Image (spheres, grey):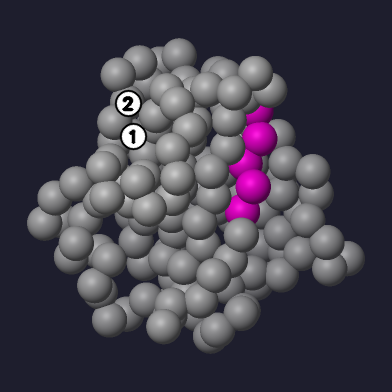
Amino acid sequence: MKKPPDSDFADKFAPNCGVLAQTLTPITGRFLGCQSKYVSPDEAFSSFIIQNSESLKILHDKNHTEVGAAVSGTDGGSPYFWCVLFSNGKRNSSFAFENGQAKSVHPGCFSGNNDDCSASTRLAIIWPLLAVVFFGVLYVL
């Protein structure tokens, strides 16, 4: 998948999610996945998020120092949107929240809705239904 322009994150992600734009580090890779039913994270990664050699290349890139993963669904459940972002910032420093706390997220919290979403059969319907994005930061080994 294409790396998003940093301006998308600074202009959309930061203000909509309560992230201080000046603290954003460059995104070095990402995976997007859409599914009509909820599956466990291990199944999501093995069945539709990581699909080909390009995905493995992103996953094994030595420039990544952090990874953040999120999954969200609409109020009634499906569709489910999976997002995994990689950055090359210092550990636990890819972004900071205004007042130290994230805003309640809403549609538009994550920009990049012009990208293809793996396992998606009806992408045009998924984006308007996306209601909540929960962003958690995990550390790369």
Residue type (three-letter) at the residue carrying disc 2: Ser
Question: In percent of the image, x 58 and y 30: which residue is there?
Answer: 73
Q: Is residue 112 visible?
A: no
Q: Answer above or below: position of 25 versus 31.
A: below
Judged left or right of residue 126, residue 15 is right
In this orientation, which residue lies closer to the viewer: 47 or 131?
47
Residue 32 badge: none
> What is the span of residues highlighted in magenta in the rendered image?
131-135
- Locate residue 64: give its quadrant: bottom left
Judged left or right of residue 34, residue 128 is right
- Judging by the rendered image, the residue that carries numbered circle 1 is 117
Q: Is residue 118 visible?
A: yes
- Judging by the rendered image, the residue that carries numbered circle 2 is 120
Question: In percent of the image, x 15 and y 56: which residue is there?
Answer: 54
Query: Mainly helix, strand or loop, the magenta region?
Result: loop
In this orientation, which residue lies closer to the viewer: 52 or 1?
52
Residue type (three-letter) at the residue carrying disc 1: Cys
Q: Secondary structure at mark 2?
A: loop
In this orientation, which residue lies closer to the viewer: 45 or 57?
45
Residue 21 x, y percent position in the rendering: 66, 62
Q: Pointer 2 and pointer 1: residues touching (CB < 8 Å)?
A: yes
